Image (tube, rainbow, N blue to C red):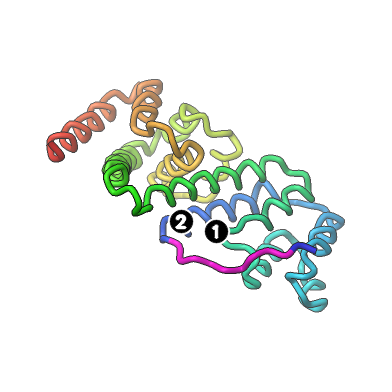
Amino acid sequence: MLKVETSIMPQSKRTMERYKEMKEELEELHLANVSKIDISNIIDAFQYEINSIRVACHIKDIKGIISILEARGTLHPENLLALETISEIVNRPFGRERINDFKRFLQFEILSNKDSHPEPIRETRCKLNLTDEVFEEVSQHLVKDWRMFARSLELKENEIHLIENRNQNKERAAKQVLEKFRDQNPKADHVSLVINALKSINRFQLVRKIEAIIASKAHSES
């Protein structure tokens, strides 16, 4: 029996989008195709939270379990213990790794929005705004080369494949590559790494556009 706290703090739209993406990736990739025995073991582990034999009998897959745990308030962006437990039960280390990516993102979001240190936070927000501008520029102009770019940012092939399956729109695919890269590397210098990745695939014109954005941003803040 696994009992966890169910208090939920309001979450930003950005956080909820990242949470939804992580959850879909777990359901469709990292925690997909588990055995009936694993499903039964997961139901047993969460019998207190499910609290209904009738509901338990209708659960057929991971998606169903996640849906019930969310409805019960056991699973939400601030409490991922249930997902971690499921990953351990089915022995899917990549699932646990993906959950940790989201937790690092969430920690970074919390630190970025703290009010106790106004000066550092203002600098962080400026940096985030610059990063968002750069990401927007890249996603708009990287339609044909987004897969090569994703590999240059060291995304795994299964992650690239999942992004491709989800997005017919190539601009959106490029944007998700950048979002995943930022989630996996919350403390990195995102802009510099993006520039290096673009250089590695010979997108020098786009690099110059980004450098112009950086120069313009620096000028406006001086």
Q: Are marks 1 and 2 in contact (CB under 8 Å)?
A: yes
Is residue 151 rendered to the left or right of residue 27? left
Quarter of the image with the N terminus is bottom right
**In the structure shown, which secondary structural element does the residue marked by tag 2 occupy?**
helix
The image shows residue 61 at horizontal and vertical percentages of 74, 61
Residue 185 colored magenta?
no
The image shows residue 6 at horizontal and vertical percentages of 61, 68
Q: Residue at x 65, y 72 (%)?
A: 72
- Identify the residue under disc 2: 15
Q: Hey, which residue is sitting farthest right in the picture?
A: 37
**In the structure shown, which secondary structural element does the residue marked by tag 1 occupy?**
loop
Callout 2: 10 Å neighbours few (<14), some, many (20+)?
Answer: some
- Identify the residue under disc 1: 77
Could you tell me what secondary structure mostly forms the magenta stretch? loop
Q: Can residue 133 be seen at all in this image of the molecule?
A: no
Which image quarter: residue 212? top left
Q: Front-most of 149 and 106?
A: 106
Magenta span: 3-11
Gap in angstroms between the C-alphas marked 1 and 2:
8 Å
